[in-house]
């Protein structure tokens, strides 16, 4: 066991463990620590806590200090320089004719490195751009290509639900989201209905997936053959949340309306299955 503190370097980012060096820290305290990128400034996201050695990446770096007035002044100065660097880099990108979109600029706290985050459709040869920027800023330059999800997380905005993006408001890390989740949840597979502003599947599909997975285990799927109080039939529609089924009975005319039953009223003879067809796969290609 070891005593650690959790430090977050972005407003909604991953929490990293550090040795508190016998100091008692509180949520929201601004601290200076040493990281793989150099000296950085972050905020306490987890107060002093004992954690198992298996949960720690050794060696555990120690807290340097709580932020001072001078540190806060440096942060303000870095933010000012980041705005200037953004304009300069955008002009250099245009001068080099590169097909890339600059998203954000970040100075490390000690100014030992400047990171430029960008998006692009494919690989970009930015070696000449890096040399050009290094000659302007006289420090280490790193260009980092990010995905559209990361871009949305950095820039923020409002989702189709009218609330701030989940990724920029509380999601520390992205979780895998698949077309199969939308299919299993009975959602419309129209790209405009299940994709977020970033153009990828909405992160919120993940939130209720465990509940839907559990419901699917005990609910006959569309295409299942079931035995009902009125005889045998084929499930043509199901509602997982209300636990109801519409069943086309074998002993009724083809044009007869399906009968509605509760899941508990039927017994599965042969279950159906959920599968994406080729057209759905083609239409939704690139959303995941």
Image: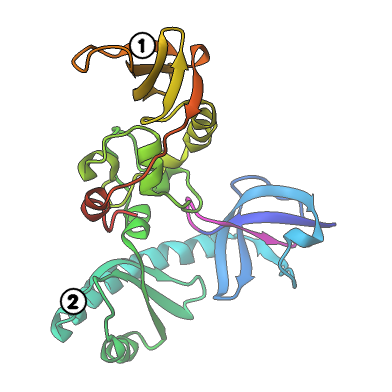
Q: Is residue 226 above or below residue 141?
A: above
Q: Kindly identify which residue carries mark 2.
A: 99
Is there any visible trace of residue 62 in the rendered image?
yes
Residue 38 vs residue 54, the one in the foreground: 54
Q: Residue at x 28, y 85 (%)?
A: 126
Residue 79 vs residue 86, the one in the foreground: 86
Q: Residues in magenta?
A: 10-19
Query: Where on the picture, by quarter, is residue 116?
Result: bottom left
Find residue 84 and report its horizontal and vertical position in percent. Answer: 27, 71
Find residue 34 and report its horizontal and vertical position in percent. Answer: 63, 71
Residue 214 appears left or right of 249: right
Q: Secondary structure at mark 1?
A: strand
Q: Nearer the viewer, mark 1 or mark 2?
A: 1
- Whether 18 is among the magenta residues is yes
Q: Earlier in the sequence, mark 1 or mark 2?
A: 2
Q: Residue at x 42, y 26 (%)?
A: 225
């Amino acid at each position: 066991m070891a005593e650690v503190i959790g430090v977050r370097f972005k407003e909604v980012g991953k929490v990293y463990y550090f040795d508190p060096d016998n100091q008692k820290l509180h949520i929201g305290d601004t601290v200076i620590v040493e990281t793989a990128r150099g000296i950085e400034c972050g905020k306490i996201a987890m107060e002093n806590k004992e954690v198992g050695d298996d949960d720690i990446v050794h060696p555990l770096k120690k807290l340097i200090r709580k932020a001072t007035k001078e540190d806060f002044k440096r942060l303000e100065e870095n933010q000012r320089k980041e705005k200037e660097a953004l304009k300069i880099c955008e002009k250099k990108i245009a001068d080099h004719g590169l097909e890339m979109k600059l998203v954000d600029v970040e100075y490390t706290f000690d100014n030992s490195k400047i990171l430029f985050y960008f998006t692009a459709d494919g690989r970009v040869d930015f070696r000449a751009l890096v040399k050009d920027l290094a000659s302007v800023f006289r420090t280490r330059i790193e260009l980092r290509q990010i995905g559209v999800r990361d871009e949305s997380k950095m820039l923020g905005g409002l989702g189709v639900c009218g609330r701030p993006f989940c990724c920029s408001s509380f999601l520390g890390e992205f979780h895998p989201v698949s077309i199969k989740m939308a299919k299993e949840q009975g959602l419309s597979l129209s790209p405009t209905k299940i994709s977020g502003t970033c153009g990828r599947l909405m992160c919120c599909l993940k939130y209720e997936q465990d509940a839907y997975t559990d419901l699917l285990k005990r609910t006959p799927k569309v295409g299942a053959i079931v035995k009902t109080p009125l005889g045998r039939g084929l499930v043509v529609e199901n509602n997982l949340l209300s636990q109801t089924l519409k069943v086309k009975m074998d002993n009724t005319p083809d044009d007869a309306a399906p009968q509605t039953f509760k899941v508990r009223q039927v017994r599965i003879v042969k279950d159906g299955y959920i599968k994406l067809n080729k057209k759905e796969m083609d239409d939704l290609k690139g959303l995941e």
